Amino acid sequence: MSIQEPERAVPESAWFKSSHSSGEGGECVEVAVCPGTIRVRDSKAKTGPVLSVAPQGWAAFVEFAARS
């Protein structure tokens, strides 16, 4: 896992929000699936840092979150 400056090569259309997002702002993250990595960013700070996670790590996180 690493935090890096925003990846300009990821098109805006690649980012998506959770289906649980109300669309009214608040706390939400956006995710982009890229070759070999999953990118995560704050939906309110689109020009802020981007978290890069290996696909296996992302899968483990999603599995854990689904059980919580």
Image: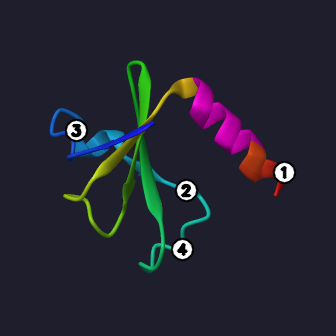
Mark 4 or mark 3: whose residue is earlier in sequence: 3
- Quarter of the image for residue 52 reads top left
Q: Where does residue 21 sit, x and y in percent of width and height?
A: 54, 67
For the point 75% across and 40% down, which residue is it?
63
Crowdedness near tag 1: few (<14), some (14–19) or many (≥20) residues, C-alpha within 10 Å: few
Depth order, front residue of 58/33: 58
Q: Is residue 29 magenta?
A: no
Q: Which residue is mark 3?
A: 11
Which residues lie in the magenta part?
56-63
- Cα–Cα gap, marks 4 and 1: 21 Å
Q: Are marks 4 and 3 in contact (CB under 8 Å)?
A: no
Q: Which residue is mark 1?
A: 67
- Cα–Cα gap, marks 2 and 1: 16 Å
Q: Amino acid at mark 2?
A: Ser
Q: Which residue is mark 4?
A: 22
Mark 4 or mark 1: whose residue is earlier in sequence: 4
Q: Which residue is mark 2?
A: 18
Depth order, front residue of 62/13: 62
Q: Secondary structure at mark 4?
A: loop
Q: Are marks 1 and 3 in contact (CB under 8 Å)?
A: no
Q: Where does residue 62 sit, x and y in percent of width and height?
A: 68, 43
Mark 4 or 1: in front is 1
- Cα–Cα gap, marks 3 and 2: 18 Å
Q: Amino acid at mark 4?
A: Ser
Depth order, front residue of 15/67: 67
Q: Are marks 2 and 1 in contact (CB under 8 Å)?
A: no
- Quarter of the image for residue 7 reads top left
